Image (cartoon, rainbow, N blue to C red):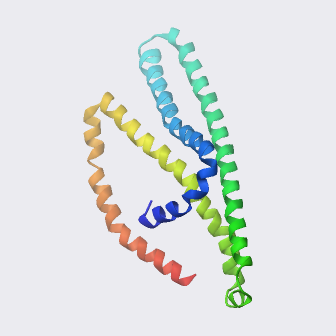
Amino acid sequence: MQRSDWKIYRRFAALLRPYRGRLAVVLAASAAGPFLLAARIWLLKVLIDNVLAGHHPQLLPAVATGFAGIAVLSAAISSWKTGTSGWVGAHLVAELRVRCYGALQDCSLRYFHGQRLGDLLTRLSVDIAAIEELLVTGLTAIISSSVMLVLFLVLLIALNPGLVLVAAGIVPVLAVTTVLQAPGTAGADRCAGAHQ
């Protein structure tokens, strides 16, 4: 997230307080996703190293059961997370639109005469949807990506520390590329905003 995104998030985070219980469970489900992915990768390692290359076919039923269990659990968590986050997002959008409509009712006719109808409709639809995506979808994506980064880094260090050094060699290149592209991207965003 950029600094401006954090300012927007802090401004609208108070709207999430009535749904903090459900949102906390959604975030926990988002954090569980990387662990299930890591378990699936570990089972694949067992299948290749022990069952196929190690010639231990007696382990195949346990590995197959593990794959099936992870698939069912992942589907259940994903379905519940999608439904709950959608419920929170829908209520958040409804609350924002009610507040916006209430604010518009307090405006004078002179205000509406000076505004373009398309701008008002865009703010009531597209902008509110973008705020919902930032507060709900963006937050779950940040949690899931952060947990995945830390978990897979720990697994890489545990399995092959040398591979971590090879992977870490790419980080300076990515950092320099990101820093060099950031000013151009910000300028493009400002130009796009000026043309709207």
Q: From the viewer's perspective, is 23 left or right of 186?
A: right
Residue at left offset 70%, top offset 55%: 91
Residue at 61 percent of width and 57 percent of height: 15
User: Where residue 174 sits in the image (x, y, percent)?
Assistant: 32, 56
Q: Return the residue found at the far top.
A: 58
Quadrant housing the N terminus: bottom left
Image quarter of the C terminus: bottom right
Residue 180 place in picture, x, y as percent: 32, 67
Number of numbered discs overlaid on the protein picture: 0
**Residue 177, position as x, y percentages in the image:** 32, 62
Q: State the residue at coordinates (61%, 59%).
A: 132
In the image: residue 128, left or right of residue 159? right
Viewer-closest of 19 and 85: 19
Query: Residue 37 location in percent, x, y?
Result: 50, 34
Indicate whether 45 appears above or below 142.
above
Q: Nearer the viewer, residue 90 or 59?
A: 90
Q: What residue appears at the point 35 percent right and 38 percent down from the top-left corner? A: 153
Q: Quadrant of residue 27?
A: top right
Left or right placement of residue 160 versus residue 45 in this view: left
Quarter residue 150 falls in: top left
Q: Residue furthest front?
A: 106
